[in-house]
Image (cartoon, rainbow, N blue to C red):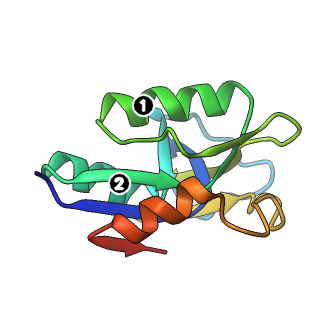
Amino acid sequence: MAHSVVVLANAVVDLCIRIGWFPVLPAEHQMTGKRLFTPGGMANSLICGARLGLETIALGNIGQDDLSDLWYGLMRAEGVNVDLVLQHPEKATTYALVLSVANGEHVFIGDRGDPNSGPAVFPASWQQVINEADAILL
């Protein structure tokens, strides 16, 4: 049986765009290169764990919109258990715009989302998963 890792954090979608140079200045227009929509934030740890053969379980909050559909699909494709992530129809999914240049320099321009989007008390289903986990990341 695989060891289980629970990650507790809100879901984020990163829009990664390659640009030509920093700094980005007004009236100095740039054409973009590669662009990629990808789960960000807690997703990095969850996906790495799943690829290493761990049972990874996401706990957190997400909106109900096109970005949440993308996040769920990509996370499930990686083998991450996202069944207990709380979806909020009245909220937008948290996102970050990630600008990067060829040498790896980058900047995150983000939206932290609503800090009060989560439950005041963990649902019983979360508590059970946390109690049974081999490791927890916050």
For mark 1, give the secondary structure: helix
Is 51 located above or below residue 123 in the figure? Answer: above
At 32% across and 52% down in the image, what residue appears?
Answer: 56
Front residue of 99/70: it is 70
Mark yes or no: residue 49 visible.
yes
Residues at circles 1 and 2 in contact by the CB criterion of under 8 Å: no
Front residue of 31/90: it is 90
Q: Spatial distance from mark 1 to mark 2, Cα to Cα?
A: 12 Å
Residue 49 in percent (x, y) is at: 24, 56
Mark 2 closeness class: few <14, some 14–19, many ≥20 residues within 10 Å = many
Front residue of 109/3: it is 3
| Residue 118 shown left or right of residue 78 in the figure | right
| Residue 128 shown left or right of residue 10 in the figure | left
Q: Which residue is mark 1?
A: 74
Q: In the rendered image, which quarter is residue 30 located in?
A: top right
- Disc ID at residue 46: 2
Residue 63 in percent (x, y) is at: 74, 40
Q: In the rendered image, which quarter is residue 101 located in?
A: bottom left
At 54% across and 59% down in the image, what residue appears?
Answer: 126
Count all numbered tags in the image, as a single digit.
2
Mark yes or no: residue 104 visible.
no
Front residue of 120/22: it is 120
- Whichever of callouts 1 and 2 sits on the residue coming sooner in the sequence is 2
- Residue type of the residue flagged with mark 1: Leu
| Residue 82 shown left or right of residue 104 in the figure | right
- Residue type of the residue flagged with mark 2: Leu
At 51% across and 32% down in the image, what residue appears?
Answer: 72
At 39% across and 62% down in the image, what residue appears?
Answer: 6
Residue 54 in percent (x, y) is at: 19, 54
Mark 1 closeness class: few <14, some 14–19, many ≥20 residues within 10 Å = some
